[in-house]
Amino acid sequence: SNLCRFGCIAIEDMHHTFVCCPQFSTYRADALKDVERSLFLDNPVIWPLALTQFYLGHVPPLDGLIPRDAFSSGILRDRVLRNISSSWHITFVRLAGRIWG
C-alpha cells in the first residue's frame, strides 16, 4: 500500500512524511525554536515553487526577502545571507535526519 505507515489517510511520499505527517510533529515543533515556522510550510512567498523542500536540504532564496539597503555594504550583506543559509541548511538536514531515522 502507498498509504502512510503511521496510519494517516495520505499517500506516503517525502512531502507528507517531512511536512504533514503528525507522527513527526514534535520533531518539527522542536526545530521551530531555531528556524522560522514558514520555512516548514508550503508558502509561495518563501518557496519559489510554493512547495517546501527543506527535507532535501534546500534553502529558499533570501535575496528577495532581505533588502539591500539594510546593510552598510554588499560584502556584509552577502556574509549575513551566507551565514543564514548555512544555519538553515544544517537545521533542515538535522530535522530530516531525525524524521527519517
Image (cartoon, rainbow, N blue to C red):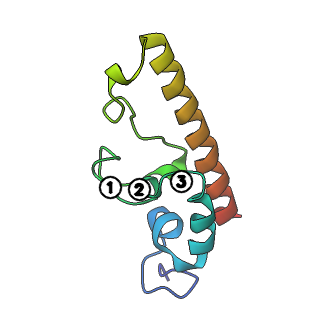
Point out the image quarter for the C terminus. Answer: bottom right
Does the residue at mark 1 contact the one at mark 2 (Cβ under 8 Å)? yes
In-image side of 62 versus 36 (left or right): left
Q: Position of residue 28 (x, y in %)?
A: 57, 65
Mark 1 lies on residue = 43
In-image side of 58 versus 67 (left or right): right
Element class at badge 3? helix
Residue 99 circle label: none
- Compare marks 1 and 3 and give the one earlier in the sequence: 1
Element class at badge 2? helix
* Image position of 68 with respect to 39: above or below: above
Residue at 45% in and 51% down: 53
Mark 2 lies on residue = 38
Mark 3 lies on residue = 55
- Amino acid at pointer 2: Ser
In three-dimensional space, the C-alpha distance between marks 1 and 3, rounded to whole angstroms, equals 15 Å
Residue at 42% in and 80% down: 10
